[in-house]
Image: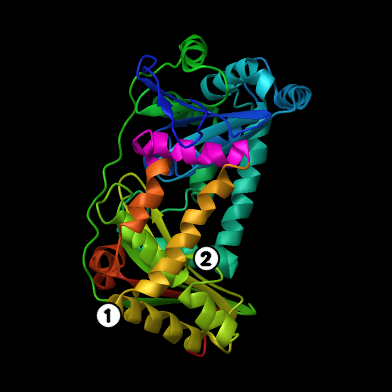
Amino acid sequence: MSDPLHLEFGRDADGLRVVRQPPPAGAASFSATYVGPAGWGFDRPGEEGAARMANQLLAVAAGKLDRVALARRLDRAGATLSRQTSPEAGEVTIWGPAEEWRSLVGLLADVVIRPRFDPEDIARVRRQFLERQLRQRTQPAHRAEYEFLRAVFPAGHPYRETGIGDRRSVERLDRARLLRFHRDHYTRSPASITVTASAPLSAIERAVRDDFGDIEVARGPELALPSVPHQRPRRVQVNLPGQSQVEIRVGGPSVALSAPTYAAAYLANEALGGRPMLSRLFQRVREERGLAYHASSHLETMRYGGIWSAAAGTGADRWKTVVRLLEEELTRLRRRGVPPAELASVRESAIGEIPLALESTADAHNLAVEVAYHGLPEDHWARWPGVLRAIDSGAVRAAIPSGFDADRSVTVVVGSVADA
C-alpha cells in the first residue's frame, strides 16, 4: 500500500494503538507521533499548567540525554522534535530522515517514557510560563482568547482554560508533581502511535512493542465534560488602556468532530470565515470596508466537543462597527444558510487542500494523526471529498443551529474600550 490517504491499523501494542501511513511519493523523511490523554483538562486544582509544562519539557531532555546532549543527538540525525497540547491530549512528534526511522522511533520512546525534568529546565520553562501569563493579561489577542473561553464554558469545564495556569499554580509545579502528571497521563491507552514511513506495518509494530513497552500506566483517564448551560447572548468588555488594537471574539460551544452534522458545520464555517480569500468575513469586513487587520472564523472540533468563534482585530475607533458587522454576518448565516453557488466554491477550495497536504511528509502525517486520535476510518481522507460533495445547502442550514448556537453565544471585546 503506497497511498498516504489510506492508512493501515495495526494490532494494539499492549493497548497502545499503532497506525501506519505510507509516505508521499518520493519522500525522503519520516514522522512519528505519540498522542495520549495528557491535555490540560486533566490538570489538578491548584496545579494548572502541569499538562503544558510537562509536555514542553518532554522534548528538552530524556533518559541519559540532558538538554545539550539531546539537541546534539537530533542534530546528528538531521531530526526535530515538536510537541503540542490541547485540553484533551498531549502529543510529541519526531521527524527525520527516512533511513533513520528505527533509531528515531526509539528516541521518541525515550522522550515519551523517560523525561528527565531536570531542575534547571523546569526553572527555565517556569519563567516562560510566567511571561505567557503576562501576555495573557496585557495583550489584546491573548486576553481576548482567555476571556472568551471563560465566558463560554462553566467552571470545571476542560475547555475553559488556556493551560498556562497562574503564577501560584505554576510556582507549585515541582519535579515530583510533573513526574506524577507524566506517569498518570502518558499511558498506553487511550493513546496511539502514528508512523509515516515506507517500512512495513509489521516492522513498525515490532518497534513500538520493543520501544514503548516500559510505559508505566496501562490506561489513563478520560475527560468528563459538564454541560454548558443555555444563556442569553451577552457581551464581555475588558479595557486595556493604551492599546492601539481591539480584539473581538464572538462565539460559543459547538459540536464534536464525531457529530453527524460536523461536515456540514465545517462547510458553514468555511463560508463564514474559514476560507481567507473567499469567506464572508474577510470580504465584507477587511476587503470591502477595510475595517480590520484580520477577520476570520474558526470551528475547533475535538473528541468530546467543540468551539466556534468569529474573530477580528481592529482599531479603537472602529470596534463597534466591526462587532455589528460580525453579528450581522452570523445572523445572515443562521437565517439564510449558504446558497448553492457559494457552497460549491468553498467546498472545492477545501477539497483542493488535500493534495497540497501530500506534498510533504509532515503535512501528510498531520492528516494521519487526526485519523488515529479520533478513531476515524482508515480511508477517511480518501472519502472526505465525496462526503463534502454530498452535502447540499439544506444540510448546511440544518447543521447551523447546533454548530453555531445563538442561545449560548458570547461577544468579547478587549482593548481601549473605556468610552463604550
Percent position (x, y) of residue 394? 24, 69
**Residue shown at 51%/12% (left/top)?**
203
Q: Amino acid at mark 2?
A: Arg
The quarter of the picture where residue 184 lies is top left
**Quick one: label 1 or label 2, which is nearer the N terminus?**
2
What secondary structure predominates along the stretch shown in magenta?
A: helix
Q: How many marks overall? A: 2
Part of the protein shown in magenta: 360-380
- For the question of whether residue 239 can be seen, the reply is no
Query: How much space separates mark 1 and mark 2, taking CA atoms?
Result: 31 Å
Badge 1 local density, few (<14 within 10 Å), some, or many (20+)?
A: few
On residue 179, which mark appears? Answer: none
Q: Is residue 134 above or below residue 115?
A: below
Viewer-proximal residue, 81 or 197? Answer: 197
Q: Amino acid at mark 1?
A: Arg
Q: Is residue 241 above or below residue 229?
A: below
**Residue shown at 71%/27% (left/top)?**
67
Q: Is residue 203 above or below residue 404?
A: above
**Residue shown at 41%/67% (left/top)?**
344
Viewer-proximal residue, 16 or 385? Answer: 385
Residue underneath mark 2 = 143
Percent position (x, y) of residue 34? 49, 29
Q: Is residue 364 left or right of residue 128?
A: left
Per the image, label 2 sits on a secondary structure element best described as helix
Residue underneath mark 1 = 335
User: In the image, which is nearer the foreground, mark 1 or mark 2?
Assistant: 1
